[in-house]
Image (cartoon, rainbow, N blue to C red):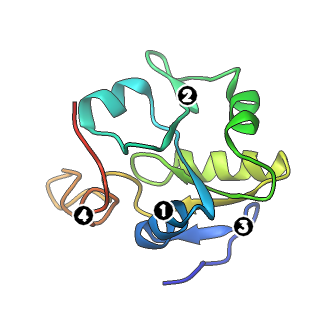
Amino acid sequence: MQVRPTQGYAGDVSPQLACAWWQSGEAVLVDVRTDAEREWVGFIPGAVPLAWKQWPGMALNPAFDEQLKAAVPAGKKVVMLCRSGVRSIATAKRATELGMEAYNILEGFEGDPDDQAHRGRRGGWRFSGLPWRQG
């Protein structure tokens, strides 16, 4: 899969393409999940941990814009990752407003829910066998 065109940001990409861009240095990988999600569910070593919303309460992170600008050098793409691909769309749009070439990673870290509403069994970064750790 290549880039799927969208409105409001550069496009949607598969976890595999995002990982390839990140590992080649073409893009910065930003994990916009909460600190608690990264701690309990797993994280990607080397990704920029930058919560869009903060736990508890899920209030918007007031420092997000400045922290994102500090994390992404001029001229680099940024690929946004969340749990399922919802917050990462919002952050890709925000990064675009800030002048960045921003992409949403489809399926997020945990993928879509299965028939029993469990995540981690249908798509996503972790399911695809891409780099991650727990604890």
Residue 87, x across and y down, in percent: 54, 44
What's the CA distance linking mark 1 and mark 4?
14 Å
Q: Check disc 4 and report its element: helix, strand or loop.
A: loop
- Which residue extends farthest top? 56
Q: Amino acid at mark 3?
A: Ala
Q: Check disc 2 and report its element: helix, strand or loop.
A: strand
Identify which residue is drawn at 70% across, 45% down.
Answer: 72
**Which mark is in front, 1 or 4?**
1
**Which mark is in front, 3 or 4?**
4
Task: Read off the residue under disc 2.
Answer: 53
- Judge by depth and name the residue closer to the eye, 118 or 92: 92
The dot on residue 23 is: 1
Q: Check disc 3 and report its element: helix, strand or loop.
A: loop
Identify which residue is drawn at 81% across, 51% down.
Answer: 74
**Which mark is in front, 2 or 1?**
1
Mark 4 and mark 3 in contact (Cβ < 8 Å)?
Answer: no
Task: Read off the residue under disc 4.
Answer: 129
